[in-house]
Image (spheres, rainbow, N blue to C red):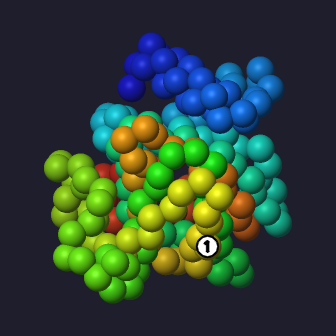
Amino acid sequence: MDEAQLIAARARAATMLAAAGIILTPEEATNIEVADFGLGRLEAEGLEIVTYENNDRYCAKELVLFSRQTCPEHRHPPVSHDPGKRETFRVRQGVVWLYVEGPTNAAGSATIRARIPEQSKSHYTVFHEIELHPGQQYTIEPNARHWFQAGDTGAIISEFSSTSRDEADMFTDPSIRRVG
């Protein structure tokens, strides 16, 4: 991703947050993390992140997803004496389809609502669907595989979790680089 794409994605995420009534400081807006996971397909598989706090006890973030943008399947494994990140997603705007381990599609259907990015289909393996709307939340336990996608209008998720260690995240797609 080049500098122009990075700046454009940050501006777009900041605009979405402002439209949702989420006010950022100038420093927070400048430091919005734009993650394309090293895949170079930000619109399909990517995530924009504002980290308010991440310390040895807890983490608070806003996750911004553009229209149909997907955060690829991953898990937060144990690290040393820590059992792994436990996170609660609370949707603030838009619709989010969250996929976790369990029976395929919570609705009992053989299909899911998300559109799996064509280039990465083999790296999506969990399909228990949870549809989240503004004001709804879901907690993901440590080391549980999960992935999520925004609906057509994009989405904003507030994440409340134990310590975030992005460098320890394990993605199903071995070509993904989360940090570095």
Viewer-side residue, 73 vs 62: 62
> Can residue 160 be seen?
yes
Pinpoint residue 3: horizontal percent, then vertical percent: 47, 16
As drawn, the residue found furthest toward the bottom would be 103
Q: Is residue 161 placed above or below 109 in the rendered structure? A: above
Work out which quarter of the rendered image holds the N terminus and state it. top left
Is disc 1 placed on a helix, strand or loop? strand
Viewer-side residue, 39 vs 147: 147
Give amino acid for label 1. Thr
> Can residue 80 be seen?
no
Pinpoint residue 169: horizontal percent, then vertical percent: 51, 62
Residue at horizontal 58%, vertical 45%? 93
| Left or right for 68, reference 83 | left
All told, the count of numbered labels is 1
Viewer-side residue, 43 vs 142: 43
Q: Residues within 10 Å of mark 1 (few under 14, many from 20)?
A: few
Q: Is residue 10 placed above or below 103 in the rendered structure? A: above
| Left or right for 162, reference 122 | right
Pinpoint residue 20: horizontal percent, then vertical percent: 65, 35
Pinpoint residue 92: horizontal percent, then vertical percent: 63, 49
Figure quadrant of residue 85? bottom right
Residue at horizontal 65%, vertical 58%? 135
Residue topped by disc 1: 139
| Left or right for 104, reference 6 | left
As drawn, the residue found furthest toward the top would be 4
Residue at horizontal 31%, vertical 36%? 41
Residue at horizontal 47%, vertical 52%? 95
